[in-house]
Image (cartoon, rainbow, N blue to C red):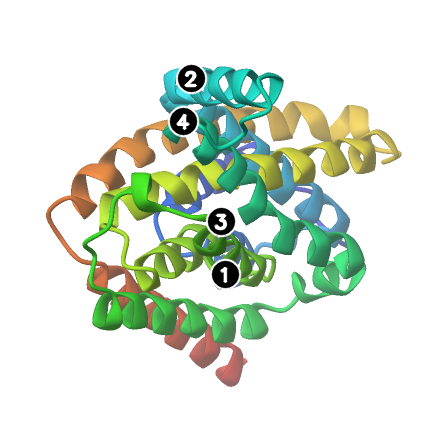
């Protein structure tokens, strides 16, 4: 008999989501691998709905942390569009660049949503994608010059970074890791790369949340699972907010190598456990 998610599992996985959504170690990967490592038998439909729901929770963390930036960017973008000078100010340009960066992942996510959803069931495949995350982090550190600010960003940079975000549709590929790598490959400084990574995650996470809500309302056991999901949702939002501030401070002083090593370690442990079962 398939078990249902427990309250403890919901809170624990919510904390894991909040930590790993913004740290470059793949939140979706951890939400697949952690239940596998602990032997938790959670129904696939419930797990997928919970995973996307707690991603919405971390979106709340982004809104809370960057709300001043978001208000400023939104106002500047709308004012510039009304004046028919959409790229006239740095904040307006940043708003458009976030839009450009959303296009690759948005298109691929809509076209291949069902195929991507199937990958979420395999811990081994997720572990292999986690190795890709480690490779991306190492490449970003090794080859990026890290000498540009966000003010120097252009639409080609934004679209290039957005292509990296499309990789994060697969569990095990960190969204923040992929997009920070893409930004550093365009020579952005680490904190600036992370800031743009977090801002550009908002449209994709918001769209995923809307889709998840439509899926949730169709679930026959919605009334039963929501009381279990909500504590995990709250935990993800609070921990996600705290993780953003910590990572921005960390990247101002240190490189990403430790996260690459961590991804390799978790991947090896997961594959080894699957091999001996």
Quadrant location of the C terminus in the rendered image: bottom right
Pointer 1 residue: 164
What is the CA distance from the residue labelled 2 to the residue labelled 1?
26 Å
First in sequence: mark 2 vs mark 1: 2
Which secondary structure lies at badge 4? loop
- Residue at the spot of label 4: 89
In the rendered view of the protein, which quadrant contains the N terminus? bottom right
In the drawing, does residue 37 fall left or right of residue 116? left
Distance from Cα at disc 2 to Cα at disc 3: 20 Å
At x 46%, y 15%, the residue is 71
- Name the residue furthest bottom: 275
Please give the label number shown on residue 262. Answer: none
- Disc 4 vs disc 2: which is toward the camera? 4
Q: How far apart are marks 1 and 4 (CA)?
A: 26 Å
Which quadrant of the figure has residue 62?
Answer: top left
Element under disc 3: helix
- Does residue 212 appear in this view? yes
Residue 213, compared with residue 42, is above or below; it is above
Give the crowd class for mark 4: few <14, some 14-19, many >=20 residues within 10 Å.
Answer: some
207 displayed left or right of 93: right
**CA neighbours of label 3 inside 10 A, class few (<14), some (14 to 19), many (20+):** some
Res 155 label: 3
Q: On the image, numbered disc 2 is attached to which residue?
A: 72
Depth check: give the residue in front, 183 or 277.
183
Q: In which quarter of the image is residue 210?
A: top right
State whether residue 19 is above or below residue 217. below
Mark 4 → mark 2, Cα distance in angstroms: 11 Å
The reply to whether the C-beta atoms of the residues labelled 2 and 3 are less than 8 Å apart is: no
Q: Are marks 3 and 1 in contact (CB under 8 Å)?
A: no
């Amino acid at each position: 008999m398939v078990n249902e998610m427990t309250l403890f599992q919901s809170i624990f996985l919510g904390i894991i989501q909040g930590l790993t959504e913004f740290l470059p170690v793949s939140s979706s990967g951890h939400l697949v691998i952690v239940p596998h490592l602990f032997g938790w038998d959670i129904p696939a439909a419930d797990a997928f709905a919970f995973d996307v729901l707690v991603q919405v929770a971390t979106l709340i963390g982004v809104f809370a942390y960057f709300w001043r930036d978001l208000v400023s960017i939104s106002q500047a973008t709308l004012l510039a569009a009304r004046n028919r000078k959409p790229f006239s100010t740095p904040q307006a340009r940043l708003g458009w660049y976030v839009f450009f960066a959303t296009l690759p992942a948005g298109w691929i996510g809509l076209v291949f949503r069902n195929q991507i959803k199937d990958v979420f069931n395999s811990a081994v495949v997720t572990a292999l994608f986690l190795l890709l995350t480690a490779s991306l982090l190492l490449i970003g550190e090794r080859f990026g010059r890290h000498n540009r600010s966000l003010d120097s960003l252009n639409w080609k940079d934004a679209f290039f970074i957005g292509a990296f975000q499309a990789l994060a549709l697969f569990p095990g590929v960190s969204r923040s890791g992929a997009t920070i790598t893409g930004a550093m490959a365009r020579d952005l400084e680490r904190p600036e790369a992370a800031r743009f990574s977090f801002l550009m995650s908002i449209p994709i996470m918001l769209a995923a949340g809307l889709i998840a809500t439509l899926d949730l309302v169709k679930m026959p056991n919605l009334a039963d699972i929501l009381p279990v999901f909500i504590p995990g949702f709250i935990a993800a939002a609070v921990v996600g907010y705290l993780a953003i501030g910590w990572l921005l401070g960390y990247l101002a002083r240190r490189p990403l190598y430790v996260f690459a090593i961590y991804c390799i370690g978790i991947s090896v442990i997961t594959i080894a456990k699957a091999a001996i079962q």
